[in-house]
């Protein structure tokens, strides 16, 4: 056979090839038995009862397919049966339940491989075949008949990824299989559980995914997120060397391990990174071995190792959050005084110090269980200063230019949104001024609005209280919010519409420097409904900012000497070069404060001769960089 058109064609072809057809003949039911290789094990009771009733009325309309029971085939019962069912076990079961003594059948000479192929392919035509039974059939073909995933994919007309996904279901633990058959897992969530290589962890994942009578099972999307969050670990975060094959003898190095997502791409298409470990137990075992090695080496080097209570005293919340106690700092923390890279990541203190700088102590991070290098902050600051890095700057100038620009844009965007919001608030009362509703709909709307207010976060609700209560000073927030929520239920339509407008927009007023690409869509849509041109307001805010910046720069600029305005300087005038000038490289100019004579003027650029013999020449000076010498 050169080409298989469909699964149905294949089933017929396999049964016909190398065999002789026989006409249907009545077979004694007591001489027929189910096949031990049939992957199908579960038969829904309702479907079975329905088929049984049909058989009682009309008999078995389609013959079953059997072969003579092979003498070498194992049989655990009494007398060995005469025929093995190749296809049609549901019809056989229904006939038995209906009390029939004979069943129509077709007897063919088939090999074990042909039997298994027909059973699997025949069952694929039936919607009620369980995916786990299908998977077990594929597994049997691979184990007993040396099939590969490519062979199976070609035989059944499915993709290789489909075959791999089905085969992986056979890795489910007993509890997960039972949940799958019971309907607590669906094929997509069952595969997610099956990909966890440790049975104990599969059971733990099953508890979360299957849910309970109150929550119900998770969706496939939620289950995937839950498993990635709980049972998968980024190898880039591993505290141990991933290429060290001596950490756990008998286990492969991480990049060679089959439990790494990148080494099974057909099964982990939904996981963005190829460098993820799916075996947290192995990961943790390697971490512990590495922990002991680092601790032992640190003590041999004479470094202090803080563990347990001693460590918690220094780092009560772990080393990743907040400041450490007793003047210590963790070297793996990012240094925000140094500019970030294109991914907005700042270098760590360890990277800045270099590997040759030895930390005097290591501390156990209770949160991660890792050993982290720590040192006195003053020592780190001093060591970095020797390298030309000043991390003690606290002014805004210590932030990198990109961060400062983002903060400026965020501030400008917040001002624009606030102005648009205020314009909407002025118009909102007009929307409800002519509304007339019956008392009952107004009451329903009032209670819905009160519920909406109750669901706001503390930050948003505080802003609403400040807008609607003139005397609210931020104190007793809880009691004030409760009282305001009750008052909403008594409001009329003229107040409910503006309040609802405020609450729906209040969350879009805050702007993060790293969230500038998120547009305030509701704010703009509401402005348009009220006939407000948001872009005109934005332009006004930008123009005002430019005007303020220009006024600020003008105020900072040094005033020109009144006795000789810079614009009136001419060749031959004695001038003094002003203080505080900087060159193109940003460094202070050495000629500042010296006196000389203008030798030439070329456009806006002045050439000045200075020195005892006027032999030194300073070029490219602007008029406002000079003042008349007295």
Image (spheres, rainbow, N blue to C red):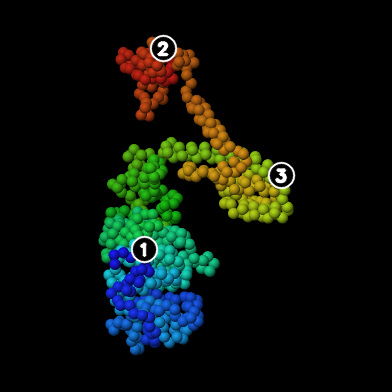
- Of badges 2 and 1, the one in the foreground is 1
Give x and y (percent) for residue 303: 31, 53
Q: Position of residue 314 (x, y in %)?
A: 42, 54
Q: Residue at label 1?
A: 158
Q: CA distance from mark 3 to mark 2?
A: 73 Å
Q: Residue at x 40, y 65 (%)?
A: 191
Please give left or right for residue 241 compared with residue 504 in the image: left
Q: Secondary structure at mark 1?
A: loop
Kind of element beneath mark 3: loop
The circle drawn on residue 434 is 3
Real-space CA distance between mark 1 and mark 3, rounded to the nearest whole angstrom = 65 Å
What secondary structure is found at the residue carrying circle 2? loop
Q: Is residue 2 visible?
A: yes
In the rendered image, the quadrant that contains the N terminus is bottom left
Q: CA distance from mark 2 to mark 1?
A: 89 Å
593 vs 98: above or below: above
Q: Residue at x 45, y 13 (%)?
A: 568
* Quarter occupied by the C terminus: top left
Question: Who's the residue at 64% across and 54% down the image?
Answer: 448
| Drawn side of residue 205 relative to residue 250, left or right | right
Disc sitting over residue 570 in the figure: 2
Residue 230 shows up from this direction: no
Callout 1: 10 Å neighbours few (<14), some, many (20+)?
few
Badge 1 vs badge 3, beta-carbon distance below 8 Å: no
- Which residue, as the protein is rendered here, is positioned at the far top? 572
From the viewer's perspective, is the residue at label 1 or at label 3 nearer? 1
Q: How busy is the neighbourhood of tag 3: few (under 14 within 10 Å), some, or many (20 plus)?
A: few
Q: Position of residue 119 (x, y in %)?
A: 36, 74
Which circle's residue, 2 or 1, is located before the other in the chain?
1
């Amino acid at each position: 056979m050169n080409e298989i058109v469909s699964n149905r064609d294949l089933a017929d072809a396999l049964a016909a090839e190398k065999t002789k057809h026989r006409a249907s003949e009545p077979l004694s039911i007591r001489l027929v038995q189910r096949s031990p290789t049939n992957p199908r094990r579960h038969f829904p009771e309702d479907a079975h009862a329905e088929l049984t009733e049909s058989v009682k009325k009309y008999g078995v309309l389609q013959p079953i397919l059997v072969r003579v029971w092979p003498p070498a085939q194992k049989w655990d019962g009494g007398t060995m049966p005469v025929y093995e069912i190749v296809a049609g076990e549901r019809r056989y079961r229904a006939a038995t339940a209906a009390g029939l003594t004979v069943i129509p059948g077709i007897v063919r000479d088939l090999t074990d491989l042909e039997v298994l192929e027909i059973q699997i392919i025949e069952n694929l035509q039936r919607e009620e075949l369980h995916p786990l039974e299908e998977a077990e059939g594929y597994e049997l073909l691979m184990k007993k008949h040396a099939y590969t995933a490519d062979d199976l994919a070609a035989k059944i007309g499915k993709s290789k990824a489909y075959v791999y996904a089905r085969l992986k279901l056979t890795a489910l633990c007993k509890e997960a299989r039972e949940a799958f058959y019971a309907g607590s897992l669906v094929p997509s969530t069952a595969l997610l559980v099956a990909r966890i290589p440790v049975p104990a962890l599969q059971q733990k994942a099953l508890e979360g995914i299957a849910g309970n009578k109150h929550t119900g099972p998770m969706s496939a999307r939620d289950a995937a997120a839950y498993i990635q969050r709980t049972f998968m670990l980024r190898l880039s975060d591993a505290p141990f060397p991933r290429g060290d094959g001596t950490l756990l003898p008998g286990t492969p190095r991480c990049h060679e391990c089959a439990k790494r997502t990148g080494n099974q791409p057909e099964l982990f298409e939904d996981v963005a990174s190829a460098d993820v470990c799916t075996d947290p137990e192995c990961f943790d075992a390697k971490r512990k071995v590495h922990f002991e090695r680092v601790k032992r080496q640190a003590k041999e080097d004479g470094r202090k190792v803080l563990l347990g209570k001693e460590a918690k005293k220094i780092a009560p919340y772990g080393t990743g959050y907040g400041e450490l106690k007793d003047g210590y700092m963790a070297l793996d923390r990012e240094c925000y005084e140094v500019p970030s890279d294109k991914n907005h990541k700042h270098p760590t203190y360890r990277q800045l110090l270099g590997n040759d700088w030895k930390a005097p102590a290591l501390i156990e991070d209770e949160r991660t269980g890792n050993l982290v290098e720590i040192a006195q902050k003053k020592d780190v600051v001093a060591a970095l200063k020797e390298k030309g890095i000043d991390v003690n700057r606290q002014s805004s100038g210590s932030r990198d230019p990109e961060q400062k620009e983002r903060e400026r844009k965020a501030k400008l965007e917040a001002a624009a949104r606030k102005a648009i919001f205020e314009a909407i608030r002025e118009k909102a009362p007009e929307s409800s001024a002519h509304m007339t509703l019956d008392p009952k709909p107004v009451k329903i709307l009032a209670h819905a609005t009160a519920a909406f207010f109750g669901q706001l976060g503390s930050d948003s609700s505080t802003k609403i209280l400040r807008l609607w209560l003139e005397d609210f000073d931020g104190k007793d927030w809880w009691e004030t919010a409760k009282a305001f929520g009750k008052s909403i239920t008594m409001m009329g339509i003229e107040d409910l519409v503006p309040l609802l407008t405020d609450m729906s927009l209040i969350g879009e007023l805050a702007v993060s420097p790293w969230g500038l690409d998120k547009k305030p869509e509701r704010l703009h849509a509401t402005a348009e409904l009220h006939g407000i041109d948001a872009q005109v307001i934005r332009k006004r805010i930008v123009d005002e900012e430019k005007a303020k910046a220009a006024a600020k720069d003008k105020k900072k600029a040094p005033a020109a000497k009144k006795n000789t305005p810079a614009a009136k300087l001419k060749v031959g005038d004695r001038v003094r070069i002003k203080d505080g000038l900087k060159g193109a490289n940003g460094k202070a100019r050495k000629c500042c404060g010296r006196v000389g004579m203008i030798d030439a003027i070329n456009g806006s650029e002045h050439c000045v001769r200075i020195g005892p013999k006027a032999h030194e020449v300073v070029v490219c000076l602007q008029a406002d960089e000079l003042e008349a010498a007295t």
